[in-house]
Amino acid sequence: MTRIIMVGCGGKMGKTISDIVRNDSDAEIVAGVDINTSWANDYPVYPFIKDVKEEADVIIDFSTPKVLEELISFAKEKKAAVVLCTTGYSEEQIEFINDAAKECTLLRSANMSMGINTMVKVMETVAKTLADAGFDIDIVEKHHNQKLDAPSGTAIALADVINEQLDGEYEYVYDRSTRREKRPVKEIGLSAVRGGTIVGEHEIIFAGTDEVIEFKHTAYSKAIFGKGAVQAAKFLKGKPAGLYGMKEVIN
């Protein structure tokens, strides 16, 4: 049994994860953290993580970057692992996470979907082969009209994985409207669509001479991110200190 503290339990993802764990015989949420402590649930809810009294194996965080230091401090004290699902960390915070992983068991991913992370694994295999064969690379992502950032963190993460296979030599291009030139060989185009209630769609396009290969992932509900977070929590239980990713979870 994996005992979980759910940080951000009153948010959409927190409620989704609560529902998933409720039907999982191998996991249990022992406490939640949310500014709204009156939110009804079948576990105690605290305004701050330092107030949590229950023992847990893993903390799942779907809240805000603002609580990062407090969260890591609590994890170190309680020797609990942490699944960091929150996005929008600054470069300084990412450095803080990397340093904390020397003492803590942490997992951080731009996207908790098992499908997206399988796509990442595929890119590690095919990107160099196709790029060396002269294929141009573009990533198109689509999200709902309430999403604030563009392109998505997942789109950038996919581009990073591809670029790593290409020795980091490719430039990211977000807008070609000011360019009057042929496409350079070493670039990855990233485009964002915002509209309606699209949960999330990511498409990687490899365009060659007389042929196109497309890899596409579509999210139909936020539940896929919750399922991935719970799988990650189970994976982290008992693991030594270090920084893990969803790559290890799906292997």
Image (cartoon, grey):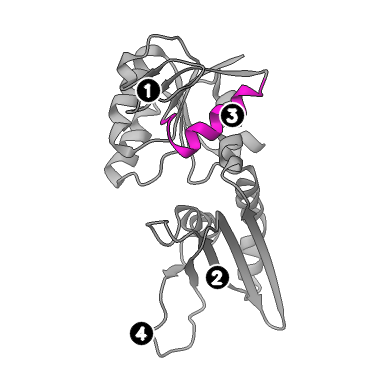
Q: Based on the displayed image, in which of its 4 quarters is residue 138 positioned?
A: bottom right
Whether residue 16 appears in magenta in the rendering, the answer is yes
Q: Residue at x 32, y 28 (%)?
A: 35
Sequence order check, earlier mark of 3 and 4: 3
Residue picked out by circle 4: 178
Mark 4 touching mark 2, by CB under 8 A? Answer: no
User: CB of mark 1 within 8 Å of CB of mark 3?
Assistant: no
> Is 118 colored magenta in this rendering?
no
Relative vertical location of residue 171 with respect to residue 60 in this rendering, above or below:
below
Location of mark 2 (residue):
138
| Residue position marked by numbered label 3 in the rendering | 19
Q: Where in the figure is residue 13, as x and y percent of width and height?
A: 49, 37
235 and 181: which is toward the camera: 235
Local crowd size for mark 4, using a 10 Å CA cut-off: few (<14), some (14–19), many (≥20):
few
| Residue 162 relative to residue 176: left or right | right
> Is 119 situated above or below 142?
above
